[in-house]
Amino acid sequence: MNCKNACNITSDYIDGCLPPQARCEYEAHISQCPECAAEHDEMRRMLSALSSLSVRGSSVDCWPALRAIIVERGRPRPVWHFLLRPVIAAPAAALAAVLTVMLVLPAQMQTPDMSSSASMSEYGHYITAHARFQRQQAFADPDVTFVAVELERARVAADRDQP
Amino acid sequence: MVEMEELAIPLVPAPKAFGAWEHTMTGQTDQAVVERVLEGEIDAFSTLVERYQDRIYSVVLNYVSNPEDAVDIAQDTFIKAYSKLGSFDSASAFYTWLYRIAINTAIDFLRKRKSRFAESLDDDKFAEAGFEPESKDPTVDPEGVATRREQARMLRSAMSRLSDKLRAVVVLHDVEGLSQEEVADVLRVPVGTVKSRVSRARAELRYVLRKMMGETV
C-alpha cells in the first residue's frame, strides 16, 4: 500500500468500513509511515472535535409556541386531503363531467334489442333520436350539408326524368 | 513506530447512535404517539417534540451556525411535521423523517438568507443563547474553554463552506453520530453515496481547516 492509497482509505478505516485484509495493510502502512500516521491522527482529532459540536441538554423548548400554532391549525390533515384543494378539485370535476358526457351520449346512440315487441317503441325513439342527431350533424358539418343538397338535387332530377 | 492507541485522542466521547434511543421516554413508540395525534389528541404531539427537539435543534444549529435561527428552524420543522403527519410512512423511522424535514428546512432557510454567514460566527450569540454557557465551576479551566470555543468556531466556519450535500452528511454522521444507513434513510440516497460523501466531506473539511489555520498563523 502506498501513501496515496492509505490517505484515500483513512476515513473508511476510522469508520470501520474496511475489509480485514485492507485494514491490516493500512495499519501496517501507517505503523511505518510517520506522514500517514500524522494524517490519521489529524483526521481522528478532527472527527472527535466534530462530535463535540453536538448539543445536548439545551434550554430550547419549542412546545409552548408550537401548541398555540397547532391548536389554531387544528388536526393534521389526512394524506388524501390535498385532493380537496380547489387547484386540483376544480379541474378534476370538469374532467369527470366531460368523461360522463362522452360515455353517456354514445350509449344512447346504440341500436336497441329488436327481439321483443316491447322494444319496438324504443326503436322508434332511437330512430327519431338518430334522425335528430343526423340533422344536427348536417347543420353543423358543411360536408354533410353539401351531400344532402346533392342528394336532394339528384332526387328532383330523377323525379323530373320519370315519364 | 506509532501505536494505534496513541493516535486516537478523543476530546469528548462520540454521541450515541440515534437509533439506539429511538423511543421511549414515556414508554410509547413514536408510531403509537403519531397515531394518537392523528386521532385528534393534539397534546400527544408534545411527547414527540420533547423527545426530539434537542437533537433537531442540534442538527439545525450545526447546519446554520446561528442559535436564534436554529430555534426558529427547529420550530418550523415541528410545524411542518405536524401538518404532514398524515403522510408519514410508518414503514420508515419517525426520527429519520423528522431529520429530513429539518435538513430541508435549514437548506431552504440558508438559500433565502445567504448573507447570514458573517453574522453566524458571532461567538457572543452562542453564549447568549445558552449554546456555550459560561461555566461557574471554579475547577473549569478558562483557557481550555476558550480553546474549545475557538476550535468550535473554526469547525463551524469550515463546515459552512461545504456544499449543502456534504454539510448535511458531516452534520448527521460526524456531529450527530448517525450511522451511514440512517443518514442514507434521512437523505434518501444509497448508502454507497453517503459513504463517498463522507470521505469527500472530511477531505474538504481538512483542507479548509488547514487553510484557515495557515491564515491564522
Image (cartoon, rainbow, N blue to C red):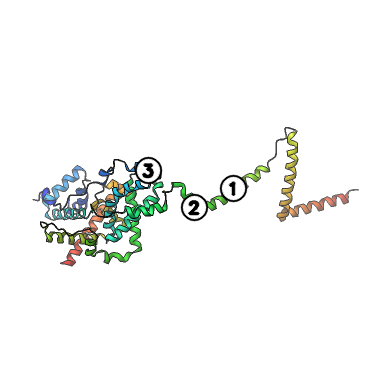
User: Few, some or many C-alpha atoms within 10 Å of disc 3 (few <14, some 14-19, many ≥20)?
Assistant: some
Q: Are marks 3 and 1 in contact (CB under 8 Å)?
A: no
Q: Which residue is mark 2?
A: A85
Q: Which residue is mark 1?
A: A99
Residue A60 visible here: yes
Residue at 46% in and 47% down: A80
Tell me where residue B83 appears, x and y as whole percent. 40, 51
Specify the subunit that label 1 lies on.
A
Specify the subunit that label 2 lies on.
A
Q: Which residue is mark 3?
A: B36
**Which residue is more in the foreground, B175 or B30?**
B30
As measured in the structure, the alpha-carbon distance from the residue carrying label 1 to the one carrying label 2 is 21 Å
Q: Which mark is residue B146?
A: none
Tell me where residue B45 appears, x and y as whole percent. 35, 47
Specify the subunit that label 3 lies on.
B
Tell me where residue A114 appears, x and y as whole percent. 72, 35
